[in-house]
Amino acid sequence: MDRRRFLLAMAALGLAAPAAQAKTAQGLFIHESPKPVPALDIRDADGQAAGLDALKGRAVLLNLWASWCMPCVAELPALDRLKPAAAAKGVAVVALSLDRGGKIAVVNTFARLSVKALDIRTDEARSAAEKLNATALPVSLLLDNQGREVARYVGAADWEGPKAAQLLDALGAGKPLTPDMAPPLAKLTAAP
């Protein structure tokens, strides 16, 4: 029996390790207590350091994506539209590309999708996914104003609905997040 079938069988029986179950589970996962976020080598369009330290004091929605991930790419236009509204709530939206192609992949994807508000952010060291324990894409980390991860959303979220607005209102205000604030998974109908 191959590893995938074994893990699926174990999950069906409720015997899989929590880490194995987390790989396939989607939706909002709220942490019991905030988790520190390791330092990341995030670069801007000019190759300059653009890490999360510059955003201390603000809540952050950190979206990890890649151009080869169809749900990631489908989610980008909604994140692009969300950025100005989230900023008004005190939440910075950062879309961090995990592409091996770096800036070129981001520029091409943003141009194809007419993304204008999101800044180019790349993981040049290609270590963010491992450091952040991101086992699936897309994943969005919700960071409090002290830079700690308070929750994460695994999968492509409907960032334009009322639940997302409620979630970001609470995050920006420093209020506790609750499961009823979870935005639904985005309905992906066609390749962008």
Image (spheres, rainbow, N blue to C red):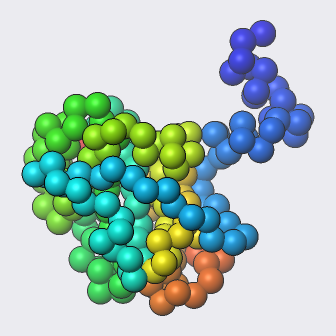
Residue at 13 percent of width and 44 percent of height? 107
Residue 64 location, x and y as percent?
A: 40, 50
Q: Nearer the viewer, residue 126 or 174?
A: 126
Residue at 51 percent of width and 40 percent of height? 130
Q: Nearer the viewer, residue 171 or 5?
A: 171
6 sits to left or right of 139: right
Residue 24 location, x and y as percent?
A: 64, 40
| Total count of labels | 0
Residue 189 seen in the figure: no
Picture layout, residue 24 above or below residue 169:
above
Q: Residue 135 lies in what quarter of the image?
A: top right
Q: Nearer the viewer, residue 97 or 28?
A: 97
- Quadrant into which the C terminus falls: top left
In the image, farthest residue toward the top = 1
Residue 98 seen in the figure: yes
Residue at 30 percent of width and 71 percent of height? 54
9 sits to left or right of 162: right
- Quadrant into which the N terminus falls: top right
Q: Residue 104 lies in what quarter of the image?
A: top left
Residue 123 location, x and y as percent?
A: 31, 44
Picture layout, residue 65 above or below residue 164:
above
Residue 164 location, x and y as percent?
A: 47, 73
26 sits to left or right of 80: right
